[in-house]
Image: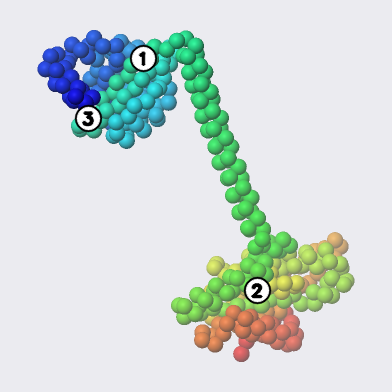
Amino acid sequence: MTYNDHMGKLEEYILGHGLTAMLEHIHAMVVVVEKDGTLVVWNHAFDICKSTFPPECKLGDLFPAKETVHTRLASKKQDHWTASLLIAANGPPILCDCILLPLANDQSLFVAELINADPETLNKYQHLSRQVELFKVESETAKKIARRKQVEVDGIMAQAHEISQVDALTILPNRRMIIRELHDEVLRAERYNSPLSISVVDVDHFKRVNDSHGHMAGDEVLRQVALQLREHIRHPDLAGRYGGEEFLILLPNSDAKAAAEQAERLCKKVRENLVHINSHTLHVTISIGVAQFVNGTDTWETLLNRADTAMYEAKNNGRDQWAISK
């Protein structure tokens, strides 16, 4: 007769001859629990243990690491493991042999029997258990530190990305970013057949400022012009430093007429904004060239070239004014 045959006969015999009496006299703790660990029924051995815990306690409260038993209950699989249980609410964990058997209606049968080991073995086990708990604490601490460091790295990377796209002097988008934005706006205008205009802005007689007052004065002039551009364009227009004393303004959903009106306003604002450098007061003006994107004809390069040509036309006409590309 096989082992399974013997167990089958034993099961039939116990069921027919007083299972209740047997459960009440064995030392193993036997409990039926819900899938969330709620206690349903239990035998006398477990009743002695439960009496030291609050009435609403769950099976997980007996384990130093509650997630261990919660995970096993959720798996709905037969399980057999060794664990330390808090047999007394304020006492030390006791080593137990644990079995979990799934039942119907999402319930499980939990059986725990104390392991009677010699003191030396128990001491070693408890020592290892403490080391494991210490490792878990250190591991969680390391994870928290790693998460904080990752947040710091992400912040630094975001700042570095932002810095790489901004002109340090004027705090406007730099040449790389404004050209990329121009490329994107041209693609959008082509796809949706929407109007798009751009303006190329150049500071008049900028070399004269540098030669007469020095490069620090020239830098201040560029900062002041950038400030006027930033404060007196509408949203979602975008101004960037194209290079040297030249700036580029993108005007999505705007035709040449609207761009010309803006150019006239910007010329006036820059003209009226006096730049004070040490004991000198500088009168600064700008020249602006405007071009409207022609779908099916223009690329971003040809659009930029037409605006640049119009800007030189404004300079040839006397500066401190704007011109529209033909």
Under mark 2, the amino acid is Leu
Looking at the image, tell me whether mark 1 or mark 3 is earlier in sequence order. Answer: 3
Where is residue 81, by image quadrant? top left
Q: Residues within 10 Å of mark 2 (few under 14, many from 20)?
A: many
Q: Nearer the viewer, mark 3 or mark 2?
A: 3
Residue 34 vs residue 61: left or right? left
Q: Nearer the viewer, residue 305 or 203?
A: 305
Residue with the mark numbered 2? 248
Q: Nearer the viewer, residue 53 or 135?
A: 135
Under mark 1, the amino acid is Leu
Q: Is residue 64 above or below residue 49?
A: below
Residue 314: in sight, yes or no? no
Residue at the image point whose x is 83% and y is 72% from the top = 209
Residue 196 vs residue 169: left or right? left
Residue 297: in sight, yes or no? yes
Residue with the mark numbered 3? 103
The percent coordinates of residue 106 (x first, y second) are: 23, 33
Q: Is residue 284 above or below residue 312?
A: above
Where is residue 144, by image quadrant? top right
Looking at the image, tell me whether mark 2 or mark 1 is earlier in sequence order. Answer: 1
